[in-house]
Image (spheres, rainbow, N blue to C red):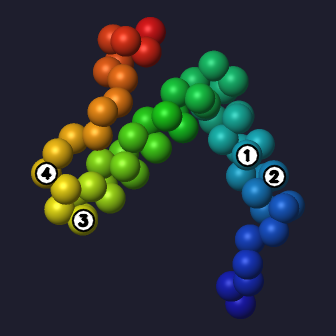
Amino acid sequence: MLSSIGPLELAIVAIVALLVFGPKRLPEAGRGLGRSMREFKAGISGDSEKPAAKSDAEAD
């Protein structure tokens, strides 16, 4: 019933994401998702220190 995700499914997801977010907001959405995942992993593992990363003001 649930098989592995193939290249066709990944292409469909990428096209839908591009249509929903647009080419200008897609990198920002990916960056936000990556930041959220890092914070979640740090919270789960119990790391109390914050990783050295650029702030939003420095990125722009």
**Distance between the alpha carbons at the discs numbered 1 and 4:** 35 Å
Task: Assign a secondary structure to mark 2.
Answer: helix
Q: Residue at x 71, y 34 (%)?
A: 19
3 vs 49, left or right, is right
**Residue type beneath disc 4:** Ser
Q: Quadrant of the C terminus?
A: top left
Q: Which residue is mark 3?
A: 45
**Distance between the alpha carbons at the discs numbered 2 and 3:** 33 Å
Label 4, residues with CA under 10 Å away: few <14, some 14-19, many ≥20 = few
State the image quarter where residue 1 is shown. bottom right
**Distance between the alpha carbons at the discs numbered 3 and 4:** 9 Å
Task: Assign a secondary structure to mark 3.
Answer: helix
Q: Residue at x 63, y 19 (%)?
A: 24
Pinpoint residue 13: horizontal percent, then vertical percent. 71, 52
Pinpoint residue 30: horizontal percent, then vertical percent. 54, 38
**Residue type beneath disc 2:** Ala
Mark 3 vs mark 1: which is more N-terminal? 1
Q: Which residue is mark 2?
A: 11
Label 2, residues with CA under 10 Å away: few <14, some 14-19, many ≥20 = few
Mark 2 vs mark 3: which is more N-terminal? 2
**Distance between the alpha carbons at the discs numbered 2 and 4:** 38 Å
Residues at badges 1 and 2 in contact (C-beta under 8 Å)?
yes
**Residue type beneath disc 3:** Ser
The mark found on residue 48 in the picture is 4
> In the image, is residue 20 above or below residue 4?
above
**Distance between the alpha carbons at the discs numbered 3 and 1:** 30 Å
